[in-house]
Amino acid sequence: MTPLARQYFEQLDKHDQLAPMREKFCLEEGLVYLDGNSLGVLPRATANHISQVVTQQWGNGLIRSWNTHQWMEKPTKLGDKVAQLIGSKKAQVLVCDTTSVNIFKLAAAAVKMRPGRSKLITEIGNFATDLYLLQGLAKLLGNKVEVIALPREQVLSAIDEDTALVLLTHVHFKTGAMWDMASVTQMTQKKGSLMMWDLSHSVGAMPINLDEINVDLAVGCTYKYLNGGPGSPAFLYVAAQHQDLFEQPLTGWLGHAKPFDFEDDYQGAAGIQQAMCGTPPVLANAALEVALNLMLSVDMHLVRVKSQLMGNLFIQLIQQRCPQFGVESPTDDEQRGSHVSLAHTQGYAIMQALIARNIIGDFRAPKTLRFGFTPLYLRYVDLWDTVEALEDIMLQESWNQPEFLHRQAVT
């Protein structure tokens, strides 16, 4: 394997078609940000737009802005924007609530749509909220359903005629390993089961084609690669062919067919609107709208190509210069999402030492260091500088300091 040089990375940046996008984000000088797979960077246009919403729409318009600025319609309008990023027709995506809440809504609906089936299948070691929500639903329903959480290699063979729902994260939050969405969906549906994908680690990082693949249900967050801001609202997808039978359990007033009639009995709205529950978060939606408009201005295929190359180069550098680390992510870029994970028993302290050098990634217990590649604002030279700093940290053992070994609440 030919050793790489920094000049090679500089040349890649010079010819990078996405390089101009970096100026559209707020990044302090000297910062290398490799955590956009956890919280995306602030778009420059966001602050001004939120200020306008606060001072003009809220400050002057007050309650009139629900109509004049269509605050109430934002969940569907933003949903239609997300739809373009996940390969969906309009009226199948709604921006609302959190990923956790949306998983519960869709999973409960799926159980009702597949009466007589008792299994909810997912992957062990999947993102915790996905597992917890299925467990909570099973507990709520008593003995009607059970959660079957299995190692990745056993999941597909467990799907049978008693399976109501399969819930998988398209790109694994820890390893970055990526399921073949098309083949898994087809295999699941052949058993008569419903397929739900968690797109939190793939939306905004690669092309997604839910309609083409014939996916049933999907959820995802908007604060990672979509740069919607901390705690920005999530989204859910219900394919058009399922919307007549879809009944979500959180029957809040905005999921009602006529919410402003304030009738005593619930009557679900038609279509995707029934997935609404409570009042939309206007300021959070304003931030997300800016971010989505920015994402829709780029070619997602270019984003994916750059992401794959970045992952390949990073792995090559680590193998050449930091052999102390195990590579937890697939080396085949067709099977890997947009982050690379390394393994080390002192992973937390090492990451803290790296952050102290203004190079930000994150840690996932028990030993995973995650490095996210966000092609719209990350440069190729950032990869070189990161591995050079990591190599020095390991040679000097500078991670072995009390301030780095002390575990903080958020890792």
Image (tube, grey):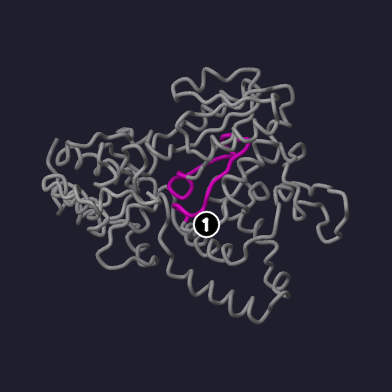
Does residue 2 appear to the left or right of 346 in the view shown?
left
The residue sitting at 37% across, 67% down in the picture is 26
**Relative image position of residue 368 (x, y in whole percent):** 32, 39
Residue 306, can we see it? Answer: no
Q: Nearer the viewer, residue 90 or 361?
A: 361
Residue located 42% across and 69% down the image: 44
Left or right for 238, reference 361: right
Q: Amino acid at mark 1?
A: Gly
Q: Is residue 217 magenta?
A: yes
Magenta span includes 77: no
The residue lying at 82 percent from left, 61 percent from top is: 260
Choose top left, top right, bottom left or bottom right for residue 54.
Answer: bottom right
Q: For this view, does 169 lie left or right of residue 33? A: right
> Measured from the top left, where is residue 94 in percent x and y?
64, 51
254 is higher (above) or lower (below) than 24: above
Quickly name the residue at label 1.
231
Give how far across and how far down residue 36 sits, in percent.
39, 53
Q: Magenta span covers which residues?
A: 201-226
Foreground pick, 145 / 375:
145
Q: Main secondary structure of the magenta part?
A: loop
Whether 158 is drawn above or below 370: the answer is above
Up the image or down, 201 lies above or below 379; here it is above
